[in-house]
Image (spheres, grey):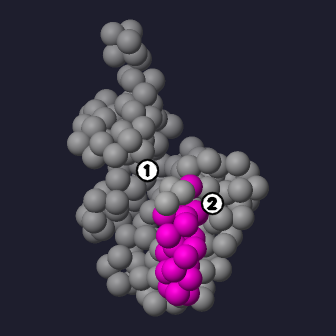
Amino acid sequence: AFRAAGDVERAAEAATVAARFSWFAGDRAGTDRYIEAALELVGSGPDSRAKAEAFTNQSGFLMLAGRFDESIQVGAEAFPLVEELGMEAQRARLHIVVGCARCSLGDSEGLREIETGISIARAAGALEMVVLGYTNLASELIFFGRLADARLAWQHFRELGERYGFARMQRTARTDGACWAFVDGRWDDVLRVADEL
């Protein structure tokens, strides 16, 4: 409908939202199709919030696909745009995403970048991004074998997800809790949580 009305910005915003819904539904092909549509709509146009959101999300989807160098490159292109437009939640997202991509390439400075993203999100009151930052930080700390720090980050993720009522994050925290029970050798807890989920 937005396309038919010639509203490129809203069409791009809708495509970006559709890409995120596709990701959460486990539809990677749909995710790629929708984010590509968003980028085609705004890619060569003037700077805008829709353009910033499309590029920010594209950086994240590339990171999740294991295309770490490309994720960092798209993130670098998006940073000036989100800063210019004062989009603090998206700036936080970029730091978290690019930090994860850097960690996945073996660059431990990516951990600091994720922490920067969490700080920006906290200052902006972007609570969902704070919580997402902690689960990503926990994951990357595990990657570097820093299990005590990873467990602490996971505890922040779990507590904040519960405090602010983010249902999908609470489910993820419970799943991760089963993993921690496994690490601790608490087999009955692993099976109980796995069966519940």
The residue beneath circle 1 is 56
Specify the quadrant of the image occupied by residue 122. Answer: bottom right
**Pointer 2 with pointer 1, Cβ within 8 A:** no
Q: Nearer the viewer, residue 97 or 31?
A: 31
Q: Residues within 10 Å of mark 1 (few under 14, many from 20)?
A: many
Task: Report whether residue 149 is seen.
Answer: yes
| In the displayed structure image, the side of residue 137 where residue 130 appears, left or right | right
Q: Nearer the viewer, residue 29 or 81?
A: 29
Q: Residue at x 71, y 56 (%)?
A: 162
77 over 176 or under it: above or below? above
Residue 119 within the magenta-colored segment of the rendering: no
Left or right, 187 with reference to 143: right
The magenta span reads 171-194
Vertical arrangement, residue 170 with respect to residue 18, above or below = below
Name the residue carrying label 2: 131
Q: Amino acid at mark 1?
A: Thr
As for residue 179 lying within the magenta part, the answer is: yes
Q: Quadrant of residue 42?
A: top left
Quick one: SS at disc 2? helix
Query: Tag 1, which secondary structure?
Result: helix
Residue 58, given in percent of the width and then of the height, sits at: 35, 49
